[in-house]
Image: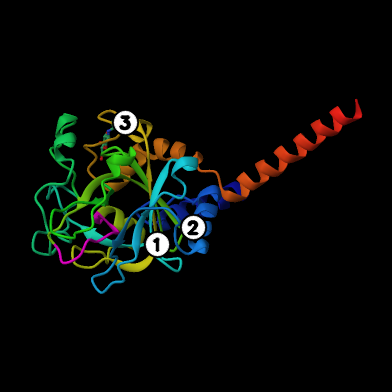
């Protein structure tokens, strides 16, 4: 009887699960998210002067506070603000997941290709470019040659094209993995940060997301991981997946591994404390000799 009840309960809860299967944010990443927000703004900026919204402020930065210790680069503004989530429809259109929310014309700044289209094509995995309806890609880095335009090239710091990124959204409660798949250009009025593919935005915020309607609260953490080990490559991801879930699941193992490497400030403080205890014990031992 009890097993039957359990079975029914699990069937019901399974049926009620949202389409996108959000992961619990692990405690170390939760701690990281909270610590960064609590600090307010980062001390070490690789580049600054970026906008989350057209109306400003232009106080958003690419931050390296945790680059040497955690191998990550992230975006932060002032007073605890992280980045928002605009929608990028660039790249391939069509396919079974195309429901028109990212159709050309809907997105004010549609581009036919994403920044690493040549790398995607070189994988010979059966697709020519990323598809905003399918691939959870993050727009990271800013390019442009207009006078006084703010730019940031993540590859200068070892972030590789199409490497796995972690995105903590829904006010810090949801974790999804994506790939670094595009950059911001200088086609708009301001150098912007905080933009992802429709598939990723939908997973975070539901299907009210469209090419011209994103998520405007600045509480999204975008974490880029430095180094080759963050790159799934041709074989390490299901590039031909027809939907978000199948693709995201294919990079989950790698994403989890990268996130496990983040040590929370609290855990680091603990390690230091224990180190000091051991040192004291050792010195006391010598002194007793
Ligand atoms: C990739 O995803 C598709 C469905 O989206 C599935 O049919 C296919 O088997 C997957 N490929 C691999 C290698 O998992």
Query: Which residue appears farthest toward the right when viewing the image?
Result: 288
Identify the secondary structure beneath mark 3: loop
Q: How crowded is mark 1: few (under 14 residues within 10 Å), some or many (20 or more)?
A: many
**In the drawing, does residue 254 fall left or right of residue 136?**
right
User: From the viewer's perspective, is residue 111 above or below residue 263?
Assistant: below
Magenta-colored span: 188-198
Give the main secondary structure of the magenta stretch: loop
Contact? badges 1 and 2 (CB < 8 Å)? yes
Q: Quick one: label 3 or label 2, which is nearer the N terminus?
A: 2
Residue 133 visible in rendering: no
Q: Distance from label 3 to label 1 (Cα)?
A: 29 Å
Q: In which quarter of the image is ligand 1?
A: top left
**In the drawing, does residue 158 fall left or right of residue 98?**
right
Say if disc 2 is inside 8 Å of ligand 1: no
Q: Could you tell me residue 153's position as x and y percent? A: 26, 46
Q: Name the residue under label 3.
A: 236
Identify the secondary structure beneath mark 1: loop
Q: Could you tell me residue 49's position as x and y percent? A: 29, 62
Q: Mark 1 points at which residue?
A: 82
**In the drawing, does residue 273 fall left or right of residue 230?**
right
Query: Which residue appears farthest toward the top when viewing the image?
Result: 289
Say if disc 3 is inside 8 Å of ligand 1: no
Residue 200 visible in rendering: yes
Q: Residue 190 carries which label?
A: none
Q: Pick the residue in front: 221 or 3.
A: 221
Q: Is residue 39 in the magenta section? A: no
Q: Pick the residue in front: 166 or 24.
A: 166
User: From the viewer's perspective, is residue 44 above or below residue 79?
Assistant: above
| Residue 75 quadrant | bottom left
Q: Quick one: label 1 or label 2, which is nearer the N terminus?
A: 2
């Amino acid at each position: 009887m009890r097993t039957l009840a359990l079975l029914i309960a699990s069937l019901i809860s399974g049926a009620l699960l949202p389409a996108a299967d959000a992961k619990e944010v692990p405690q170390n990443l939760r701690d990281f998210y909270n610590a960064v927000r609590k600090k307010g703004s980062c001390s070490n900026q690789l580049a600054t002067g970026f906008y989350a919204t057209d109306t400003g402020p232009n106080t958003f930065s690419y931050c390296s506070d945790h680059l040497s210790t955690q191998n990550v680069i992230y975006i932060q503004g002032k007073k605890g603000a992280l980045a928002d989530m605009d929608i990028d429809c660039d790249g391939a259109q069509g396919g079974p997941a195309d429901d028109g929310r990212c159709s050309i014309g809907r997105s004010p700044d549609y581009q036919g290709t994403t920044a690493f289209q040549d790398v995607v094509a070189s994988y010979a995995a059966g697709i020519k470019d990323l598809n905003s309806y399918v691939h959870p890609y993050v727009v990271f880095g800013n390019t442009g040659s207009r006078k006084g335009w703010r730019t940031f090239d993540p590859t200068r710091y070892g972030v590789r094209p199409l490497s796995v990124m972690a995105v903590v959204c829904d006010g810090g409660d949801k974790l999804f993995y994506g790939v670094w798949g595009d950059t911001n250009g200088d086609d708009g009025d301001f150098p912007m940060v905080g933009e992802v593919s429709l598939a990723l935005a939908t997973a975070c915020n539901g299907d009210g997301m469209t090419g011209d309607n994103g998520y405007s609260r600045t509480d999204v953490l975008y974490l880029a991981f430095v180094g080759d080990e963050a790159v799934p490559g041709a074989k390490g991801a299901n590039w031909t997946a027809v939907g978000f879930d199948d693709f995201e699941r294919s990079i989950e193992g790698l994403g989890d591994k990268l996130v496990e490497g983040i040590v929370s400030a609290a855990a680091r403080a603990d390690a230091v404390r224990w180190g000091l205890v051991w040192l004291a014990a050792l010195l006391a031992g010598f002194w007793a000799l």
